[in-house]
Image (spheres, grey):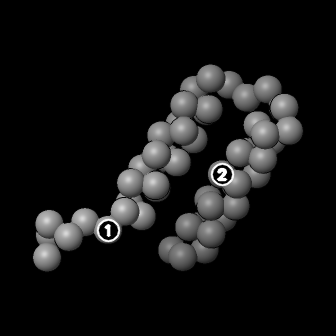
Amino acid sequence: MVIFFYVGNECLSIIENLGIIGVPLPDGLVKFIEQLSKEGSNNNVKDDTNE
């Protein structure tokens, strides 16, 4: 199970880097990656209301 996380994480990283260097990516894929990035940044914020 953990290996799937690492493989998926590396694949997303590769796709993000391809976009940065200018390789054209499908719009749906770009939106999906942006959504994942937003969710990830929201999860890094500590929420004290649950304590």
- Of 9 and 38, nearer the camera is 38
Q: Is residue 35 above or below residue 31?
A: below
Residue at 14 percent of width and 66 percent of height: 49
Residue 37 falls left or right of residue 47: right
Residue 33: x and y in percent read: 57, 41
Residue at the far top in the pictured view: 27
Q: Which residue was labeled with disc 2?
A: 12
Count of labels in the image? 2
Task: Quote the CA–CA distance across marks 2 and 1.
Answer: 24 Å
- Type of amino acid at the residue the image marks with label 1: Lys
Residue at 52 percent of width and 48 percent of height: 37
Residue 31: x and y in percent read: 54, 31
Residue at 84 percent of width and 32 percent of height: 22
Q: Is residue 21 above or below residue 48?
A: above
Name the mark on residue 46. Answer: 1
Q: Is residue 3 above or below residue 11?
A: below
Residue at 79 percent of width and 26 percent of height: 24
- Type of amino acid at the residue the image marks with label 2: Leu
Quarter of the figure with residue 13: bottom right
Screen quadrant of the C terminus: bottom left
Label 1: how many Cα within 10 Å (few below 14, some 14–19, many 20+): few
Give whichever of discs 2 and 1 has the lower sequence position.
2
Q: Secondary structure at mark 1?
A: loop
Quarter of the figure with residue 4: bottom right
- Of 48 and 29, nearer the camera is 48
Name the mark on residue 26. Answer: none
Label 2: how many Cα within 10 Å (few below 14, some 14–19, many 20+): some
Q: Label 1 near label 2: C-beta < 8 Å?
A: no
- Of 36 and 43, nearer the camera is 43
Circle 2 or circle 1, nearest the eye: 1
Residue 3 falls left or right of residue 43: right
